[in-house]
């Protein structure tokens, strides 16, 4: 089993990158994990916000494997507490031989094609967050979920 975080665009903040890398190393103690970035599209005269979402959506769909258990990180998704997220992770580990792929869209979100293809959505907040900040928040929550599963004293409840 492997977990992939598929992101649109790179993290441009060195400070965020350092924090993200710290959690990536921690996660690696429990499971194979990688962050895979695909290039983002820029607005132009010929490409409006919907065009950007469509182009990025095609890249996202091309990056997914048929055996991936895909979850979109989306502000319209299901909101879970950390313990509930850990339980969902455990279920995925127990019930699937598939890889788990969490997807963070670009600045304008996901295209309709991505929403039609991927039904599962998870929200880290009801607020709209920078797609770069979502990376940090997600890897922290993934580490927290793995720590809960493995009975480490990281999470206090």
Image (cartoon, rainbow, N blue to C red):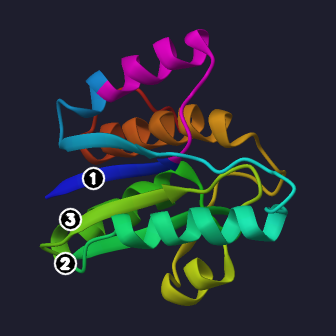
Taking the spot 47% from the left edge, 12% from the top edge, the residue there is: 18
* Quarter where residue 50 is shown: bottom right
Disc 1, SS = strand
Residue 94 placement (x, y as % from top left): 17, 71
Q: Which residues are magenta?
A: 8-24
Q: How many residues crowd around disc 1 within 10 Å: few (fewer than 14), some, or many (20 or more)?
A: many
Taking the spot 42% from the left edge, 37% from the top edge, the residue there is: 144
Q: Is residue 5 visible?
A: yes
Query: In screen coordinates, is 48 left or right of 90?
Result: right
Q: How many residues crowd around disc 3 within 10 Å: few (fewer than 14), some, or many (20 or more)?
A: some
Callout in the foreground (3, 1): 1
Query: CA–CA distance between discs 3 and 1?
Result: 10 Å
**Residue designated by label 1:** 3
Placement of the N terminus among the 4 image quadrants = bottom left
Query: CA–CA distance between discs 2 and 3?
Result: 6 Å
Q: Which mark is residue 93?
A: 3
* Quarter where residue 37 is shown: top left
Taking the spot 51% from the left edge, 71% from the top edge, the residue there is: 58
Disc 2, SS = helix
Where 61 sits versus 34, above or below?
below
First reached walking from the N terminus: tag 1 or tag 2: 1
Disc 3, SS = helix
Residue 3 placement (x, y as % from top left): 27, 52
Question: 31 or 70, which lies in front?
Answer: 70
Question: 53 or 2, which lies in front?
Answer: 53
Residue 72 placement (x, y as % from top left): 54, 66
Q: Is residue 67 magenta?
A: no
**Residue designated by label 2:** 95
Q: Is residue 122 visible?
A: no
State if disc 3 and disc 2 touch (CB < 8 Å). yes
């Amino acid at each position: 089993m492997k977990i992939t975080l598929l992101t649109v665009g790179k993290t441009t903040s060195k400070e965020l990158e350092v924090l993200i890398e710290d959690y990536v190393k921690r996660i690696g103690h429990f499971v194979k994990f990688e962050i895979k970035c695909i290039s983002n599209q820029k607005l132009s005269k010929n490409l409006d916000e919907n065009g950007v979402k469509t182009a990025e959506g095609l890249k996202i769909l091309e990056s997914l494997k048929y055996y991936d258990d895909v979850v979109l990180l989306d502000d319209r998704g299901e909101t879970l507490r950390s313990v509930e997220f850990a339980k969902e992770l455990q279920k995925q580990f127990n019930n699937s031989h598939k890889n788990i792929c969490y997807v963070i869209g670009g600045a304008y979100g996901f295209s309709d094609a991505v929403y039609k293809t991927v039904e599962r959505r998870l929200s880290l907040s009801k607020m709209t967050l920078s797609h770069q900040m979502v990376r940090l928040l997600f890897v922290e929550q993934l580490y927290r979920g793995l720590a809960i599963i493995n009975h480490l004293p990281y999470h206090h409840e």
